[in-house]
Amino acid sequence: MTKNIIGKTLGTLGSQWRDALARAIIERKISPNILTITGFVINLIGGVLLIFGVMAHTRFNWIHALAGGVIIVANIFDMLDGAVARMSNRVTRFGAFCDSVTDRYSDMILLGGAITYFALRRDLPWVIISVFALFGSVMTSYARARAESLLPGKFNAGYMERPERIVILAVTCLASRLYMGMLIIAVFSNLATFHRIWDAWQVDHNLEHPDDARKYYGSPNSPFVIRAIRNLVFWSYPRQTWQHDVLGAVLLILTLIAPLRF
């Protein structure tokens, strides 16, 4: 059984809170597109704060902690725009397009801010890791969109989709451990991209039974270590499953126990 009662309960409470805010916004006749643009502008401020983090001269980077709070606020707007559009019957194709485009720009601005921060510190290894985080973030979305335009079914496998990336980035900034956020995003976003490429290849070679093509990722009789690694590479547990929440908790613990860097 993979259902997580706690995760599902928290998800329901979050949806209720989101819908209550959305109703208040609808009463004030605020356009969903205004929310989308507002969230983008706030993310832009977050990206600038990540760069300005180079000005902090203490082990705990309070500028990055501020950036983490800004990122959370920005993505509350991003969460609300879709809810407002649905609840007010104002869903449009342009609105969906605008939301997707601004999400990609927001991702690149935030990760670009991190890359610039490490570059200004002359920290080449973390510049490279952050660049891979940017690659993975862009390619995760592109691989899904392109595969779904060509092949049947959904291609949303992998742990590191946009909500997880934003949470990881915000939490690691709040904890003044931006380098951990870049490392986690670099690893898991590129694993998700690889998984989607693998699924697309499997489905393309088994179009008569596309669902069966994505069921098996190796022998169940393999040694435990091999199966554990394979499960991380081919992550297939959605949100509100205990496996998803356990991985999130492990990454949070690793972030908190990681050393502060001056």
Image: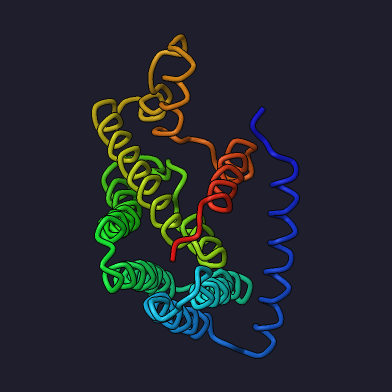
The answer to whether residue 229 is visible is yes
Q: Where is residue 185 drawn, in percent x and y? A: 40, 53
Left or right: where 116 falls relative to 81: left
Residue ID at (54%, 77%):
66
Residue ID at (71%, 47%):
8
Please, which residue is most extreme toward the bottom here? 28
Left or right: where 40 falls relative to 108: right
Q: Which residue occupies the foreground of this view, 22 or 162?
A: 162
Q: In the rendered view, would you say 239 is above or below 228?
A: below
- The image quadrant where one finds the N terminus is top right
Q: Where is residue 205 drawn, in percent x and y? A: 24, 27
Q: Which residue occupies the foreground of this view, 230 or 170?
A: 170
Left or right: where 38 falls relative to 182: right
Q: Where is residue 216 drawn, in percent x and y? A: 41, 21
- The image quadrant where one finds the C terminus is bottom left
Q: In the rendered view, would you say 32 is above or below 134?
A: below
In which quadrant of the rendered view does residue 92 lie?
bottom left
Q: Which residue occupies the foreground of this view, 43 or 147?
A: 43
Q: Where is residue 161 drawn, in percent x and y? A: 45, 52
